[in-house]
Amino acid sequence: MKVTIKPSKLNGTVKVVSSKSLSHRYVIAAGLAKGTSVVSNVLDSNDLSATKKALEGLNVTFEDEKVISSGYKLISDTVDCIESGSTLRFMIPIYMLQKEKVIFKGSGGLIDRPLNVYENIFTDKGLGFHHLEKDHYLPLEIEGKLEGGHYKVRGDISSQFVSGLLFALPLAKKDSIIEITTPLSSKGYVDMTLDTLTKFGIQYEYVDNRIFIPGKQKYEPRVLDVEGDFSQGAFWMVAGTINQHKLPLFLRNLDPLSKQGDRKIADIISKMGGYIYFQKDLKQFVVYPRQTKGGLIIDIDPIPDLGPILMVLAALSEGETHFINCHRLKIKESDRLNAMYEVLTKFGVEMKITDDEAWITGQTSLKGNLEFSSYNDHRIAMAIAIASLRADGDVTITDSQAVEKSYPNFFEVFKELGGLVDEID
Ligand SMILES: O=C(O)C1=C[C@@H](OP(=O)(O)O)[C@@H](O)[C@H](O)C1
Ligand SMILES: C=C(OP(=O)(O)O)C(=O)O
């Protein structure tokens, strides 16, 4: 699919889509709890379909909002994670709670996203972990049973390795320690996992860089609701800020006290001179258009998913904005640092990058009448769409269906707000 966006101004109210990260976590924990849980407002997207299918392979069934498990049992020996890093890295240790061989598959960029952290710790424990194609991480064959014990885990490649172990180890026979051997990147996501475990009755103790997890625990079925997604709300917050409409955007379904690390977006916009606040009585964020200022150093390490859209904001903020720890952006669905460099320089923006940093000098408008690739990356597609609000002409995005990974109706919402979008199949 391809979309062409004509110069548009957005106005109105968005009910922000459900959190991808919490949807993954709640259905996984519910799937590991014997009995019936009820999880409402689970995100309906490609990534969540992959996680649900992976759970079905362990004898979990889904009926509307019900997640039903009659006990952990392997019924499928293949798991297709499509392009979802969370599904892959969360489900590997969970499938390793039994001893049979299982093949993990994936597509797009996922086949090359790192799995070396698991490879090191599982081969150390004598478990099977074999890449079936020489130059790619996937397909992957795993074999052997995770028994608990002491796991030394690097935390600087992806927090998803820590989260995956955290889901599985409470069900292992023996007690475990996860020792995080480097500073933990994307820490907010591990906090979300720990919070989910607590909600489902799992015990652990987190002291310094070690998480102690008693074995032989049981997940308890629960009734829960998935809140809105700050990583996705961020696109609308930046849209509301850079928009040339006189009126604000109103964003509903976001909890300002959420555990999501990406709720930081509202503070960053404020620090850059934006005007955004939470209106308690109406439970909504209100975002007014403002000329924002650069001059900030933004550390991407804890908030990698905000990278692309913050770069768009920097491109339209006065002065220079400096981004650090950008290597984290290179191992997502695309190399997001390079992709944003190509996108913004094509829009006419002055941008410099190294392997780990970026400097963006803002300007008042962007070039138009341009065609961009989505890089098959949902966050790049959405960032280009929001940038188009300040382009001097039409903006076309090819492979725009990439948004189906996390926000299938993104362009419909864009249109409902007054965006002029033509879609071509
Ligand atoms: O645990 C999660 O839900 C996620 C963790 C982050 O990945 P990393 O830990 O690899 O940065 C984030 O980028 C991803 O979109 C979702
Ligand atoms: C990187 C992302 O997700 P995942 O790692 O689950 O593929 C993302 O949503 O931007």
Image: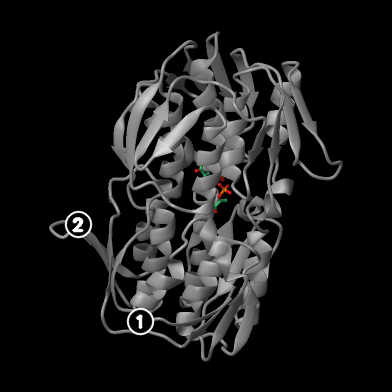
Q: In this rendering, is residue 325 above or below 121? A: below
3D distance between C-alphas at marks 2 and 1: 23 Å
Residue 283, numbered label: 2
- Looking at the rendered structure, the number of numbered marks drawn on it comes to 2
Image coords of residue 259 (percent x, y)? 36, 42
Q: Residue extending furthest top?
A: 174
Determine the residue positioned at 63% across, 48% down. Answer: 82
Sequence-wise, which precedes: disc 2 or disc 1? 2
Say which of 95 and 136 sits in front. Answer: 95
The answer to whether residue 350 of the structure is visible from this angle is no
* Left or right, residue 154 beside residue 50: right
Q: Is 371 left, or right, of 219 in this rendering?
A: right
Rate crowding at label 2 as few (under 14), some (14 to 19) or many (20 or more) other CA atoms within 10 Å: some
* Quadrant (top left, top right, bottom left, bottom right) of the C terminus: bottom right
Q: Is residue 283 left or right of residue 40?
A: left
Query: Do labels 2 and 1 touch, CB within 8 Å?
Result: no
Amino acid carrying label 1: it is Gly
